[in-house]
């Protein structure tokens, strides 16, 4: 499949991202000149199911080169557009994309039986379970643990795939298996409510952050230059936020709303997940679109702005100062948009050269 059909699959996910960012601004208290009702309430599902499930689903479909796998980004992306339009059953369509993503991950495991493929498949199943639970009406604060597990296990599996080239180290695999088990138990049990399961999930995230800092190759990249160093910085910063997010869950549990809820979720989804997106995009985007996206030092500036924005947001959350949280939140969205624009310009210029 050439790049243009792939862009068609990616486009609804891009719309979901833009709408999700607008919804985030509305949640922060900004008055927006858009006529979409309940947009602020759609922020989380648009970002996780509409955007991330679509992008990851497209990546998996391209890797498998199997026609049915492209139904994952098609359903989640189209469902996101219908969700924005207010259709009542759109969440089920979005969840259908997550189901196909799980099947794609299981097909990848069948083709290449390995621990990293199994972990990514477990992550996809968590995402599917969370998306179905949300579509069927479970409150977001009880669903979000499964979405955290989806993205965390997906990333952990991808990073583990790269560590297979490193010499074996004592305790690496058993410790990871224990952490994965704790994540699965904590995420699943968090759907029942209460504080015990989220705290168990937090302890597992904290442990996984330490595991990644010790065993992943990201720190080796810090000694390199150019793109390799950028990737190392993005991943290492992401592992820091993953650890801090785990600590926050240990301390707060899973708040149902308010400043603590905002802090816990954005430490993990913005600090950790988007650090991973920044770090992986210059490698994954060329593979998906079959076009180079050369590195530019501006990407490092936007990465720094992303983390500065999160620090400001957390200061606002901790002190319950809405204005500081607004500034931090807005700067974070600016960093994401500038990163996307820079990547797009570099990709287009590379195609013309």
Image (cartoon, rainbow, N blue to C red):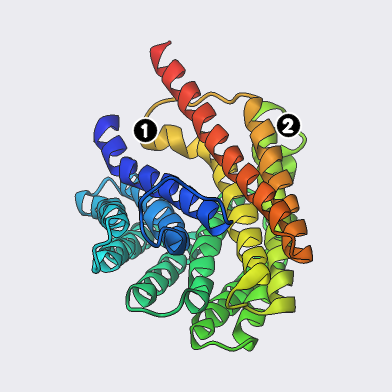
Q: Is residue 144 left or right of residue 1?
A: right
Q: Is residue 8 left or right of residue 237?
A: left
When asked about the image quadrant of residue 179, the answer is bottom right
Query: What residue is at 36 percent from the left and 79 percent from the top?
Result: 137
Camera-side residue of 272 and 226: 272
Camera-side residue of 99 and 39: 39
Task: Please give the residue where the numbered disc 2 appears in the rendered image.
Answer: 224
Where the N terminus falls, by quadrant?
A: top left
Is residue 215 visible in the rendered image? The answer is no
Q: Position of residue 165 (x, y in %)?
A: 60, 48
Q: Position of residue 230 (x, y in %)?
A: 67, 35
Camera-side residue of 199 and 105: 199
- Element type where label 1 sits in the image: helix
Q: Position of residue 278 (x, y in %)?
A: 58, 41
In the image, is residue 280 above or below residue 145? above
Task: Please give the residue where the numbered disc 1 appears in the rendered image.
Answer: 289
Query: What residue is at 41 percent from the left and 49 percent from the top?
Result: 19
- What separation in Å lies between label 1 and label 2 (alpha carbons)? 26 Å
């Amino acid at each position: 499949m050439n790049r243009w059909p792939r862009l068609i699959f990616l486009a609804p996910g891009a719309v979901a991202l833009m709408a999700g960012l607008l919804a985030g601004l509305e949640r922060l208290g900004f008055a927006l000149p858009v006529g979409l009702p309940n947009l602020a309430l759609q922020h989380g599902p648009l970002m996780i199911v509409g955007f991330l499930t679509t992008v990851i689903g497209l990546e998996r479909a391209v890797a498998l080169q199997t026609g049915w796998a492209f139904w994952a980004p098609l359903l989640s992306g189209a469902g996101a557009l219908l969700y924005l339009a207010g259709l009542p059953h759109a969440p089920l369509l979005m969840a259908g994309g997550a189901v196909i993503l799980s099947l794609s991950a299981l097909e990848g495991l069948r083709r290449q039986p390995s621990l990293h493929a199994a972990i990514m498949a477990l992550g996809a199943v968590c995402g599917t379970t969370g998306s179905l639970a949300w579509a069927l009406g479970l409150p977001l604060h009880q669903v979000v643990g499964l979405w955290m597990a989806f993205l965390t296990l997906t990333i952990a599996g991808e990073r583990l795939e790269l560590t297979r080239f490193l010499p074996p180290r004592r305790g690496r695999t058993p410790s990871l298996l224990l952490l994965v088990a704790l994540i699965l138990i904590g995420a699943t049990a968090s759907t029942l409510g209460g504080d015990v399961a989220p705290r168990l999930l937090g302890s597992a995230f904290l442990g996984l952050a330490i595991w990644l800092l010790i065993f992943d190759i990201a720190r080796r990249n810090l000694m390199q230059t150019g793109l390799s160093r950028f990737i190392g910085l993005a991943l290492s910063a992401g592992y820091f936020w993953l650890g801090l997010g785990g600590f926050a869950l240990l301390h707060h549990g899973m708040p149902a709303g308010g400043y603590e809820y905002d802090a816990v979720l954005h430490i993990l989804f913005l600090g950790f997940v988007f650090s991973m997106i920044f770090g992986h995009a210059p490698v994954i985007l060329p593979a998906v679109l079959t076009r180079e996206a050369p590195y530019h030092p501006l990407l490092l500036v936007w990465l720094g702005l992303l983390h500065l924005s999160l620090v400001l947001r957390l200061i606002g959350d901790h002190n319950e100062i809405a204005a500081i949280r607004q500034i931090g939140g807005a700067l974070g969205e600016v960093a994401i948009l500038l990163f996307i624009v820079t990547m797009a310009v570099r990709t287009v210029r590379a195609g013309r050269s």
